[in-house]
Amino acid sequence: MTPQHDKTSVAAISIFASGGMAAAKFAVGIAIGSLALISEALHSSIDLVATIITWAVVRVSDKPADDEHHYGHGKLESVSALGVTALLYVLAGGILVESYSRLREGTPPPTISAVPFVVLVIDIVVNLWRARALHRAARETRSQALAADALHFASDVMGSCAVIVGLILAGLGFWWGDAAAAAAVAVMIAALGLRMAGSTVQTLVDRAPEGAQEKATAAIRSVAGVIDVERLRVRMVGATTFIDTIAKVPRTYPIDRVEDIKRKAQAAVAKAFGDTDLTFTAVPVARDNETVRDRIMVIARNSGLAIHHVTVHDLGTKLIVGIDLEVDAGMQLEAAHDVANTLERNIQEEFGEDVEVDVHIEPLEPELPFGVDAAPERVQTIAAALAEYAAGGEIHDIHNVRVRNTDAGEIVNFHCRAAPSMSVIKVHEHVDAIERALRRAFPSVKRVISHAEPPRA
């Protein structure tokens, strides 16, 4: 059964229970002339109205957001609870006026019999059951309207107990017992209304739930990649917790990794709060452990430039930076030089005018050059040459050789093996030597792509 069905079912059952008990108490109160019992019946009537409103509201409050209600319809529950509170105060005022009038005029006590006590005991049992069912449903669905309804019925129990005390006092000869019990019921209703109004108004004015900000902040900070939470705001709309946050993330992270942080932050707050809607604004910031190379890569990425082979030398008095900059192969030298100069100036603005920057301009490789697989004989020839160049060296077991003819020339891919303890730079040096030898022997080879791996276990 869905939470929405739970809410409407519990509210619908409460309507019939409220109507039946209100009618019974009102009829008996009129018959015996008990203001306290009539007051309690009127209180139950207000509960009936409140339950009908609750039943109608919960059918609407869980509707999803639309073009006119961007945060959904959950606050209808708060508005309905505020309306019911107003009805309670009107009822409490009327009962107090009538109680004062009877106490001043010395109205005769009601006729005492077993009937009102039986009705009140049944009412207490029914209200305890309803309050428990509503409270459980309100807790599970985080419905403010159902919570208000549960509070009504819990207060009805106290009201019924007060009426019983009043009737007992009247039966013992204290003529004022019934009117005093009615006044006590009015005070309970007013206290209930005050409590409801407080929580409802706090929701309507978007007061953050107690401890929600700290809880949400801790959940987001627990996500790997979040450096800090700069700002966080929480508001409740019905059962949904809306969280707006500005979080600091490393500026060196690519966009897809930042998006992954956002998804994990949403999962973290959902685990902490349940039904949540997170607005996550990522602010890129520099970390204390950023290297010079990291900072240069950020500068290039922010300019939309493709760079590689960044080398940095610290001479103590100044930095020397070397960069390979890839530009469109068809770009004129003057335009490419302007791009390189702009990159150099941006780096100097970051590190100071005395930094020495050299930019090597090279053509950007075409993304998807047209190509076809070379003939098997050609593949065998190049594979044999690769095996010859690797013979006796640190690189061995040349395999998975592929050759493709493209508009730019031949592209060769191969796999090879090296000692697992060999450093990456050593592997690169040996493989690079093989690649250079292959290009010298086969001028038609445009590019060689190798993949080194450790020996098979």
Image (spheres, rainbow, N blue to C red):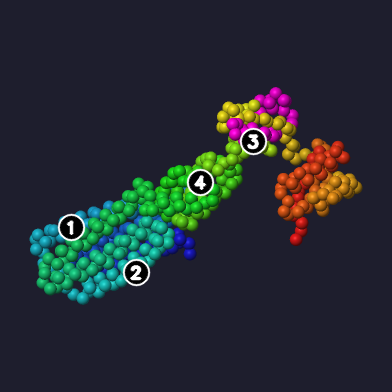
Amino acid type shown at disc 3: His
Q: Name the amino acid type tagged 2.
A: Trp
Q: Nearer the viewer, mark 2 or mark 3?
A: 3
Quote the CA–CA distance across marks 2 and 4: 50 Å
User: Picture coordinates of residue 391 (x, y %)?
Assistant: 85, 50
Q: Nearer the viewer, residue 282 or 17?
A: 282
Q: Nearer the viewer, residue 195 or 279?
A: 279
Q: How much space separates mark 1 and mark 3, taking CA atoms?
A: 88 Å
- The answer to whether 314 is drawn above or below residue 189 in the figure is above
For label 2, the residue is 129
Residue occupying the point 57% across, 49% down: 260
User: Quick one: which residue is furthest to the bottom in this view?
Assistant: 114
The amino acid sitting under disc 4 is: Ile
Secondary structure under badge 1? helix
N-term-proximal mark, 2 vs 3 = 2
Residue at screen point 79% across, 50% down: 394
Badge 3 or badge 4: first in the primary sequence: 4
Residue 41 vs residue 392: left or right?
left
Given contact means CB atoms under 8 Å apart, are the residues at marks 1 and 3 in contact?
A: no
Residue range (magenta): 313-340
Instruction: For marks 1 and 3, give the one nearer the viewer.
Output: 3
Quadrant the C terminus occupies? bottom right
Q: Determine which residue is flagged by label 4.
A: 227
| Mark number, residue 96 | 1
